[in-house]
Amino acid sequence: MSTKKVCIIGSGRQGTAAAFDLVKFCNNIDLTFLDINSKQSAASSDRIFSLLKYRAKHVSFNICDKEKLITFLAPYDIFLSSVPYKLNPYLTDVAIKSKTSMVDLGGHTLNVKKQLLKNKEAQNANITIVPDCGMGPGMNVSVAMLGIESMDSPKEVYVWDGGLPQNPKPPWNYSLFFNIQGLTNEYDGMAYFIENKKVVEVPCFEYLENIRFDNIGELEAAVTSGGLSTMPWTYEGKLDVLHNKTLRYKGHWSQMKAFRELGLFQEKEIDFKETKVSPREFYHHLLSPKLTTSLNKDICLMRVMVKGSHENREKTTIVDIEEMYDEETGFLAMEKWTGWHASIVMIEIMNKNIGSGAIPIEKALSGNIFYKRALDRSYNIKIKNI
């Protein structure tokens, strides 16, 4: 493979993890971090060098300078957007104008649907755009595809996933492993599932259930938004049921539901003591420090159950995956699952295994290809067929 020029826009946790994987699994790569914070991009470059003895470039400017960004990205083959999800439609337009392929960490389904409307423009630019990579949405969809592909006639798909602290501290029993804006985005609004072959809206925090995992015990699972990306629309009329829930320690969902009912998720400013305050910004300001710690080691869990039939027999496939904080590299489990899934998709694009256009993740990456790439990265995957 000829040398590929790759840019990571946003050199935070997930972007750095993606860069690590790209450098490790690409033989010829010219990688650059782009971040408005020059210290952050330099630190990410230093970290990659300390782990892999590869010196990534690092550049700092405001990506909202559109013409500058288009000119900068024009020589690149592909970039990863690991900045807040609200910027992804803007970066999709930049990708098309600069003729640079793009992968993002998504998380907002309506944004993704807007991006996918750019399919023809992306094809005309001869580039590939795959939104909603990462852990969930992203890897969870790829694992669901693995189960679906194992059957002649899949009928029901259930997905549970979540990232948790290994040693939860009360009263929160949770740690922030990614941007708090993304967390609240997942907890607000509606999720989209399939029930009776039709796409349905389900409010966040509904369908609460207990579910047991061998190494961690009983957890609570509830509905959050955006976790399935566009998969419900792709499989409407094909699957009877498609559900996805997020895993947390017990009590978390009742806390978050109370915060939401108090109005703390509201973005619109309110009048308070002769000033205007956004409840959500204030909530983030108070909660983020409580959930942020550099000492917390995490665990990520994922379970997918697919029911259907294969070779004229009823079949149930259960896929369990577990990931722990990496003592050797210092990467969180969530950083690995998020960044590495994006990296896997980027490598497939660079190897021309994914065609041009704006393509949903469930169509861009097959479950079987993801499974092979995951084994290359020593993922702990257990598959049981019943």
Image (tube, rainbow, N blue to C red):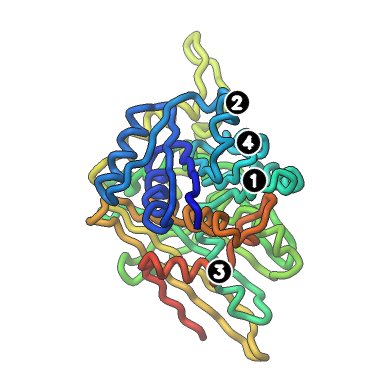
Q: Amino acid at mark 4?
A: Ser
The amino acid pointed to by label 2 is Lys
> In the rendered image, which residue does mark 4 sit on?
98
Can the viewer see residue 118? yes
- Disc ID at residue 121: none
Q: Which mark is residue 66?
A: 2
Mark 4 or mark 1: whose residue is earlier in sequence: 4
- Mark nearest the camera among 1 and 2 is 2
Q: Nearer the viewer, mark 4 or mark 3?
A: 4
Badge 4 density bin: few <14, some 14–19, many ≥20, Cα 10 Å: many
Characterize the local packing of mark 2: few (<14), some (14-19) or many (20 or more) Cα atoms within 10 angstroms: some
Is label 4 or label 1 in front? 4
Sequence-earlier tag: 1 or 2 = 2
Q: Nearer the viewer, mark 2 or mark 4?
A: 4
Question: Helix, strand or loop at disc 4?
Answer: helix
Q: Which of 279 and 363 lies nearest the eye of the viewer?
A: 363
Left or right relative to 14: residue 145:
right
Q: How many marks?
A: 4
SS class, disc 1? helix
Determine the CA span between mark 2 and mark 3.
36 Å
Three-letter code, disc 1: Val
Horizontal arrangement in the rendering, residue 75 relative to residue 165 (left or right): right
Q: Which residue is mark 3?
A: 367
Please name whichever residue, 154 or 46, is drawn nearer the observer in this view of the structure.
46
Q: Quadrant of residue 247?
A: bottom left
Per the image, the residue denoted by label 1 is 112
Q: Residues within 10 Å of mark 3 (few under 14, many from 20)?
A: many
Q: Position of residue 84 (x, y in %)?
A: 51, 36
